[in-house]
Image: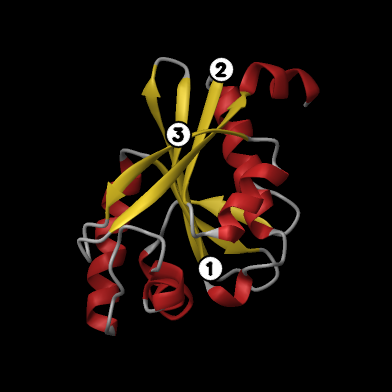
Amino acid sequence: MEAEDIILEKAKYKDWRSMYRNVWSRPETAEYMVWKVTSDEDGARERIQRTIAWQETHDAWLVYEKGSRQAIGFAGVEEIEPLIYHETGIALGPEYVGRGYGKQILRLLMKYCITLGGQEFCYSTRSGNLASKALALSCGLVYQYSEQRTDQRSGKSYELEIYRADLKRLGRRT
């Protein structure tokens, strides 16, 4: 899948280095996610192998910057109920935030779900993640509700906000 500045493609082993440098080793990228930082290159090589295996059976991709052709993030979706899809995480390395890439990714994911016959798209973010909330709203998603969750890494409680888009309506506009 392709947008103006980014491409979503399945991971390749050679991507381990750019994913490690741009995403997996970055605490600021992991802050609002459910994964842990990868602390060394051996760990990154193992992680890319797990990523490749995961992506073989899931609607998940790495994000590549068109200009540099390097992996700068990841994104995915899953069907949570018939015709209802939810993003499974969108992450970009800190140097790539604020460039409009998140909006391009989210729009690609929603268009992809429309091609699958999806009627509804759900998006979730921690309440403290202001950039993610702004992204959801900028792409036409509407706040639905919040729920309390516990961070698996720290054991601390946080508020998860759920947003929704009507893909039938969006599909008619594309």
Say if 110 sits above or below 25 in the image.
above
Residue 133 is situated, as x and y percent measured from the top left of the image, at 59, 50
**Distance from label 1 to label 3 (Cα)?**
21 Å
Task: Tell us which disc is closer to us: 1 or 3.
Answer: 3
Number of residues whose C-alpha sits closer than 10 Å to that of mark 3, classed few (under 14), some (14–19) or many (20 or more): many
Number of residues whose C-alpha sits closer than 10 Å to that of mark 2, classed few (under 14), some (14–19) or many (20 or more): some
Q: Give the labeled residue for mark 1.
A: 72
Task: Tell me which label, 3 or 2, sits earlier in the chain.
Answer: 3
Q: Give the labeled residue for mark 2.
A: 119
The kind of residue on which mark 1 rests is Ile
The answer to whether residue 1 is seen in the rendering is: no
Q: Are marks 3 and 2 in contact (CB under 8 Å)?
A: no
User: Which element type, helix, strand or loop, lies under badge 3?
Assistant: strand
Tell me the colour scheme of the image: secondary structure
Q: Nearer the viewer, residue 88 or 42?
A: 88
Which residue sits at x=45%, y=34%? 86
The answer to whether residue 57 is seen in the rendering is: yes
The kind of residue on which mark 2 rests is Gln
Q: Are marks 2 and 1 in contact (CB under 8 Å)?
A: no
Say if 131 sits above or below 14 in the image.
above
The kind of residue on which mark 3 rests is His
User: Which element type, helix, strand or loop, lies under badge 1?
Assistant: strand
Q: Nearer the viewer, residue 23 or 30?
A: 30
Residue 64 is situated, as x and y percent measured from the top left of the image, at 57, 62
Picture quarter with the C terminus: top right
The mark found on residue 86 in the picture is 3
User: Would residue 87 appear left or right of 134 to someone viewing this image?
Assistant: left
- In the rendered image, the residue lying farthest to the right is 173
Which residue sits at x=31%, y=38%? 57
Which residue sits at x=65%, y=52%? 134
